[in-house]
Image (cartoon, helix red, strand yellow):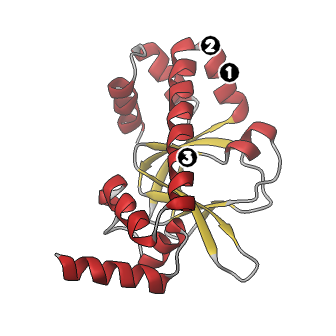
Amino acid sequence: MITAFENYLRQETSLSDADIHQISSLAIRRKLRRNEFLFREGEVCRHKVFVISGLLRIFGMTPDGGEHILQFSPETTWTIDAESYDRQTPSIYNIDAVEPSELLLWTKADFDSLLTRIPQLKKFAEQLISGNTYSGRRRLLTALSATPEQKYEDFVQTFPRLLSRLPLRMIAGYLGISLKTLNRVRQAQLLRS
């Protein structure tokens, strides 16, 4: 598990082997079963999380039991409830495993210490945050202004590898449309093909 993470860092950064080893040495290994929660609404997000394998999702619940999915985190991605983590306040979101998942976690104290000691890691983390900000803004604009057909097409283009891994209800929850609408959009797309 650590080897896959170290290979990821070698591909994505110019960190030295010593720095990579230092980062890896503070990681906590964790496995989640399908549908197992990493944390629930009301708990504090205490770890920075890297997904080695599997698939996580961040979602909120509506009073009537519906789900609004904010993000999917497949292998080789980082995930976190940034507000809860940064402020150490209770989260309004849940993170659970869509598939059996293997994770690496770092406590806030350990990761903050790494950022201080390894400037290249801090720079890399800032690049990841910027990328998430840009994609979040793009997603927000799509959610506010696109038709259901455009939302689905954007999802297909952005996450082609996730289509076969996710139940339709989760895709609908991510797109902010009903399952009935998603089925209609997919059926119309099939008829056009």
The image quarter containing residue 151 is bottom left
The image quarter containing residue 119 is top right
Give the secondary structure at mark 2. Answer: helix
In the rendered image, residue 71, in percent from the top left (x then y), is placed at 53, 56
Q: Residue at x 48, y 74 (%)?
A: 172
- Find disc 1 in the rendering and name its residue: 113
Q: Residue at x 32, y 27 (%)?
A: 11
How would you rate the neighbour count of disc 1 (Cα within 10 Å): few for under 14, some for 14-19, many for 20 or more?
Answer: few
Q: Nearer the viewer, residue 159 or 46?
A: 159
Give the secondary structure at mark 1. Answer: helix
Q: Of the residues under marks 2 and 3, which one precedes in the sequence?
A: 2
Q: Of the residues under marks 3 and 1, which one precedes in the sequence?
A: 1
In the rendered image, residue 155, in percent from the top left (x then y), is placed at 39, 60
Q: Nearer the viewer, residue 110 or 188?
A: 188
User: What amino acid type is highlighted by mark number 3?
Assistant: Gly
How would you rate the neighbour count of disc 3 (Cα within 10 Å): few for under 14, some for 14-19, many for 20 or more?
Answer: some
Give yes or no for contact between labels 2 and 1 (Cβ–Cβ under 8 Å).
yes
Q: Residue at x 36, y 78 (%)?
A: 185
For residue 158, side relative to residue 115 (left or right)? left
User: What amino acid type is highlighted by mark number 2?
Assistant: Arg
The disc at residue 117 is: 2
- Find disc 3 in the rendering and name its residue: 136
3D distance between C-alphas at marks 3 and 1: 27 Å
For residue 65, side relative to residue 142 (left or right)? right
